[in-house]
Image (spheres, grey):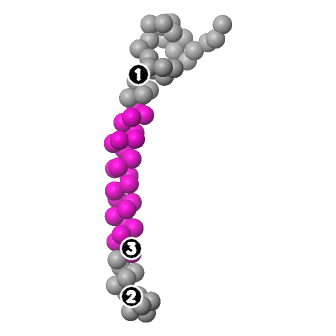
Amino acid sequence: MLTYAFADTGRSKDDTPSIGCFDRPFLIHIIRDVFVISPIVTVPEFSLKAALVNYMDITNGEDEA
């Protein structure tokens, strides 16, 4: 018989809220990471890159043109 990670909580596999083979809290955590935390990281990263490109264009634009 397979042992599951939630065996220590006293719950069996049949009474856990799950979608497919994943627990619902795990899926909520993953969805939150993708749709909330990823944009929070991506926006400052792209902003910094745009600022750096703009700065390099202002300082070295005539030399590279």
Mark carried by residue 39: none
Quarter of the view holding residue 23: top left
Mark carried by residue 52: 3
Q: Check disc 3: other Cα within 10 Å, few if <14, some if 14-19, many if 20+.
A: few
Image coords of residue 1 (percent x, y): 66, 7
- Left or right: 37, with 21 as reference point: left
Say whether residue 37 is magenta.
Answer: yes
- Depth-wise, is mark 3 or mark 2 nearer the camera? 2
Quarter of the view holding residue 52: bottom left
Residue of label 2: 61
Residue of label 1: 24
Question: Type of residue at label 2?
Answer: Gly
Residues shaded magenta = 29-53
Q: Does label 2 or label 1 sit earlier along the sequence?
A: 1
Quarter of the view holding residue 3: top right
Image coords of residue 39 (percent x, y): 35, 49
In this rendering, the answer to whether 53 lies above or below 58 is above
Q: Residue at x 35, y 79 (%)?
A: 55
Say whether residue 35 is magenta.
Answer: yes
- Depth-wise, is mark 1 or mark 3 nearer the camera? 1
Q: CA distance from mark 2 to mark 1?
A: 52 Å
In this rendering, the answer to whether 14 lies above or below 64 is above
Q: Check disc 1: other Cα within 10 Å, few if <14, some if 14-19, many if 20+.
A: some
Tell me the element at label 3: helix
